Image (cartoon, rainbow, N blue to C red):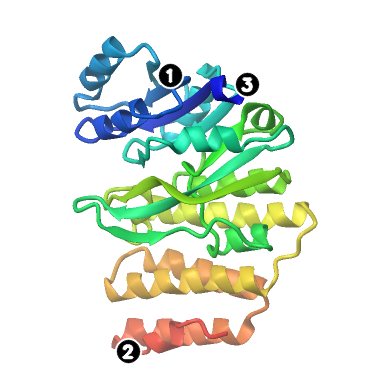
Amino acid sequence: MLETSLISIIIPTYNRAHIIGETLDSIIAQTHTNWECIVVDDGSTDTTSEVMSKYIASDTRFRYYNRPKNKPKGPCSCRNYGFEKSKGDYINFFDSDDLLKPEAYTKAISSFKTETDAVIINTALIDFKTSKHISTNKIYSDNLMIDYFIGKVTFLVCGPVWKRSFLKQQPYLFDVTIGNVDDWDFNLRMLYANPKLVYINEELIYYRKNHGSFSEEVRKLNKEEIISDFKARKKQLQLIEDYGIKPNDAIKNYIINRYSKHLKIALRRNDSSKYLIFRKLIGQSLAFKYYSQALSFIFGFILFITFKRGIKYITFRL
């Protein structure tokens, strides 16, 4: 019976002692009570272990692990390890600053049919400090794979509740070599496997905008995260071709536009990453046969480096 099904909630965490309690409280408040919450610590140096000890003492449904030292650091490794430790027939990968409405899992579990592989819950983005609503994600389209690739459709790592049997069939879950856009990479690979999806177009999860998160690091020109972002895009371009999908203009335009925006930010800030981003932008433009755009980017780059002018030539034009 679905109402008695065990759902495993898997949460990686790192130095979130000050906020993880709110996330755990929203899990305790669930009207679907048959859950286990597995928190995997990525090496916190704050009081996360003390916070978790209190929750474990008061509710045996919580389990707390430290990421094994022989596994790579990062949330992807923690999620994979949490999945190994989980027992539920249904899996929800959650983050340590997200929040749930009390009825979230009740509605998700009741939406599963025999053939369903995942239920996608809609997510609202709210301000971390004020809880003010910022935006609501679009989680469905008739061209899901392409629209998810280019960001017209967005369900974060917390949005899908997966059937365990579907995840077990996949070659691997989270890519431990990717730090940035890891949820984008994971969800795309799951979509390539053609899962049967059900959508709950109701805001039942709150994703809190956190200025210290991985998603902010590329915009802050963190070199390591920029490289990770490039790696993920290159990987997905190859994967979609492996699945017989030719990158169309929408995908190509999305990638070049994204890289050109990063380059403009780097130039305006005179950040050393500008050379790395420039090389990637030109290389990708040439690979897509966007020759005139590549010439425009080169001209704009040289002009800006020399005279601090010409940023308009780095703007991608369809």
Residue position marked by numbered label 1 in the rendering: 68
Q: Which of marks 3 and 1 is nearer the N terminus?
A: 3
Considering the numbered disc 1 on the image, is that residue within a helix, a strand or a loop? loop
For label 2, the crowd category at 10 Å Cα-Cα, with few meaning under 14, some 14 to 19 and many 20 or more, is few
- The residue lying toward the viewer, choosing from 8 and 295, is 8
Q: Quadrant of the C terminus?
A: bottom right
Q: Is residue 110 left or right of residue 128?
A: right
Q: Is residue 278 left or right of residue 59?
A: right
Percent of width and height locating residue 66: 37, 19
Residue 1 — which label?
3
Residue at the (38%, 35%) spot, across then down: 102
- The residue lying toward the viewer, choosing from 215 and 7, is 7
Residue position marked by numbered label 2 in the rendering: 309
Considering the numbered disc 3 on the image, is that residue within a helix, a strand or a loop? loop
Q: In this view, does 225 lie to the left or right of 317?
A: left
Percent of width and height locating residue 49: 25, 19
Q: Separation of disc 2 and disc 3 at Cα?
A: 66 Å
For label 1, the crowd category at 10 Å Cα-Cα, with few meaning under 14, some 14 to 19 and many 20 or more, is some
* Residue 275 makes an appearance in the image: yes
Three-letter amino acid code at disc 2?
Arg
Work out whether 45 lies above or below 146: above
Q: Earlier in the sequence, mark 1 or mark 2?
A: 1
Work out whether 163 lies above or below 295: above
Choose top left, top right, bottom left or bottom right for residue 276.
bottom left
Work out whether 238 lies above or below 109: below
Q: Separation of disc 3 and disc 1 at Cα?
A: 35 Å
